[in-house]
């Protein structure tokens, strides 16, 4: 579920009410120019060089403050896999990232107990955790505030509800 930072600010909730209303973690996603334009990205995944990927990850925090999109990690009715939150370019994903460097089904998020995990979905340009590329199919536990990347150009912060409230309150 997508929501703007302005919408969250406008709610004016204290931390307890915010966490009660927004109980799922979220991805604060930096929007690359290609995605914010809203054009048709086509059917094929663009291959990115390692230099492009490193430069993109290094500028992630700056980009998050300039332009960003917020996606709560909530299951949609578009995805048939019960215990997975899917991220990718295809419209059937729970989180749709319309960027040519993102694969159709790029990565998945899952929760076991109180721990959230990210897993690469055999993506063409890789899935990143705190700047390190995951092995194909690898599953890694996430901590609050971790950086994640999809194809190197789409970067995000994984935020638990309390941290998201702190971020929104600081704007």
Image (cartoon, rainbow, N blue to C red):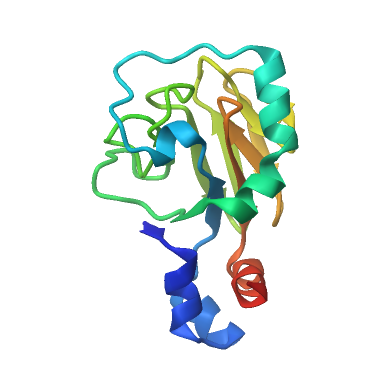
Which residue is pictured at 51% across the width and 45% down the height?
Answer: 110
**Depth check: 14 or 113 in front?**
14
Vertical side of 79 occupied by 39: above or below: above
Q: Is residue 8 left or right of residue 118?
A: left
Q: Is residue 97 left or right of residue 152?
A: left
Can residue 86 be seen at all in this image of the molecule? Answer: no
Which residue is pictured at 57% across the width and 22% down the height?
Answer: 137
Which residue is pictured at 62% across the width and 58% down the height?
Answer: 159
Q: Quadrant of residue 56?
A: top right
Vertical side of 128 occupied by 116: above or below: below
Q: Quadrant of residue 4?
A: bottom left
Q: Residue furthest left?
A: 77
**Depth check: 109 or 96 in front?**
96
Percent of width and height locating residue 72:
45, 57
Can residue 21 be seen at all in this image of the molecule? Answer: yes
**Depth check: 2 or 135 in front?**
2
Q: Quadrant of the N terminus?
A: bottom left
Which residue is pictured at 51% across the width and 14% down the height?
Answer: 124
Percent of width and height locating residue 131:
74, 32
Percent of width and height locating residue 136:
60, 18
Vertical side of 108 occupied by 83: above or below: below
Q: Quadrant of the C terminus?
A: bottom right
How many circles with numbers are drawn on the protein? 0
Percent of width and height locating residue 133:
69, 24
Vertical side of 27 occupied by 165: above or below: below
């Amino acid at each position: 579920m997508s929501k703007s930072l302005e919408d969250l600010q406008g709610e004016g909730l204290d931390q307890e009410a915010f966490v009660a209303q927004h109980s799922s973690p979220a991805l604060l996603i930096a929007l690359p120019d290609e995605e914010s334009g809203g054009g048709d990205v086509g059917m094929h995944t663009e291959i990115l060089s390692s230099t492009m990927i490193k430069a993109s990850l290094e500028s992630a925090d700056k980009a998050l403050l300039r332009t960003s999109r917020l996606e709560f990690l909530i299951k949609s009715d578009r995805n048939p896999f019960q215990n997975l939150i899917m991220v990718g370019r295809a419209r059937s994903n729970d989180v749709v990232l319309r960027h040519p460097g993102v694969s159709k089904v790029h990565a998945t998020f899952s929760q076991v107990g109180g721990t959230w995990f990210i897993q690469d979905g055999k993506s063409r340009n890789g899935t990143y955790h705190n700047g390190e590329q995951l092995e194909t199919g690898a599953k890694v536990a996430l901590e609050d505030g971790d950086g994640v990347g999809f194809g190197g150009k789409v970067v995000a912060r994984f935020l638990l509800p309390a941290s998201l409230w702190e971020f929104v309150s600081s704007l």
